[in-house]
Amino acid sequence: RHFNFSAGPAALPEEVLKTAQQEMLDWHGCGLSIMEMSHRSDEFMSVAAQAEQDLRDLMHIPDNYKVLFLQGGATSQFAMVPLNLLRGKTTADYINTGVWSKKAIAEAKRYCDVNVVATTESTQFTSAPTQDELVLNPDAAYVHYTPNETIGGVEFDYIPDTGDVPLVADMSSNILSRPFDVSKFGLIYAGAQKNIGPAGLTVVIVREDLLGDTLAGTPTMYDYAVHAAAGSMNNTPPTLAWYLTGLVFKWLKAQGGVEAMEVANRRKAEKLYQAIADSKFFSNPVVKRNQSWMNVPFILADSNLDSTFIAESEKAGLLNLQGHRSVGGMRASIYNAVNEQAVDALIAFMNEFERTHG
Ligand code: PLP
């Protein structure tokens, strides 16, 4: 297997894939695969419940939060959040730090007045605002932000303090990368295909008291309370993705949990950013305190060499380093399943590329 720096769907731990391979034809002696059995069977229900418990353990999720395993991706959450959390109010606060924040804002505008309480657009989204720069509206239904902008590689270095107004986070690309105090959030959501598991599953962690007061006309499948009451089985859930996600959670526990991930991820990111800082050929525009641990965009001094860089990196077994189509350049996504060896191999390749082409 090659080193995979994809932003998502992203690398999965090899141990997880091996277990899935072993269990694929005959899950635990049942004589059929996990994806061929009813989601309401005792066997699948136990897989589902264990995955939820393992996530609760990993993130130390308090008992007054529901954990939902949904479909529709993080993009559906851009609508589900306002539909469920406006709760009679007409405005919501949004922090704008890049492409994903903007998409969340555009969708929320269909349902409420959006108050953009801080934006870093004028500096091309190369930083996140500080707490002092957030001019929050005490009447807002909630405050939404994107703790890690996957495309820009901008990560908040703190959790915003929003007082009594619930804080909502699109944690798609940094959930489980380090400990987060869940009690500081009203709602956390994340598409699975980066740091959780395969595509097809969306995890939502929501404080119970925020449920049950949706906007008129909210579709049944967009109502968190419906999913909470049905154990995320109001309809047929994505059983294969849920099972694989459960294997990733078990793997994370065996690694020492998010506390161990924090140590590993810090080391990986510091190494790569240091290599970029030491280079005269590669650069990253993000202010140091907001350099993402998960997504590291970088550009070459000569963009004419971009295609050569991609071709040679692929030949060296380093896959998916091209930047997002909207920004170009390169991006190395170094999620939990991308180990330090992969980062070392990338740095060695970059040094050699600079020596021969720089
Ligand atoms: N939010 C962030 C921060 C993302 O990185 C992505 C996907 O890349 C999305 C939302 C959209 O997720 P999905 O494709 O699951 O709808």
Image (spheres, rainbow, N blue to C red):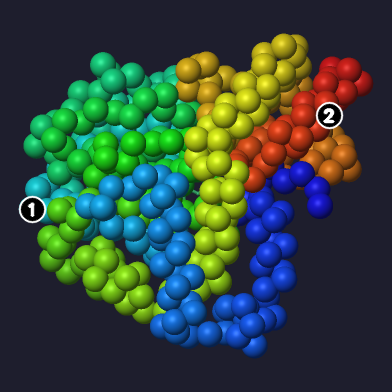
Residue 90: percent from the left, percent from the top? 11, 47
Q: Name the residue nearer the viewer: 123 or 287.
A: 287
Q: Residue 20, located in which quarter of the rendered image? A: bottom right
Q: Amino acid at mark 1?
A: Gly
Figure check: 189 above or below 40? above
Q: CA distance from mark 1 to mark 2?
A: 55 Å
Please report whichever mark, 1 or 2, sits nearer to the chain's N-terminal start: 1
Residue with the mark numbered 2: 349
Mark identifier at residue 347? none
Residue 349: percent from the left, percent from the top? 83, 29
In the picture, the quarter occupied by the C terminus is top right
User: Which mark is nearer the camera, 1 or 2?
Assistant: 2
Q: Name the residue nearer the viewer: 123 or 75.
A: 75
Residue with the mark numbered 1: 88
Figure check: 322 above or below 66? above
The 10 Å Cα crowd at callout 1, few under 14, some 14 to 19, many 20 or more, is: few
Q: Is residue 292 left or right of residue 48?
A: right
The 10 Å Cα crowd at callout 2, few under 14, some 14 to 19, many 20 or more, is: some
Q: Amino acid at mark 2?
A: Phe
- Which residue: 50% across, 66% down? 242
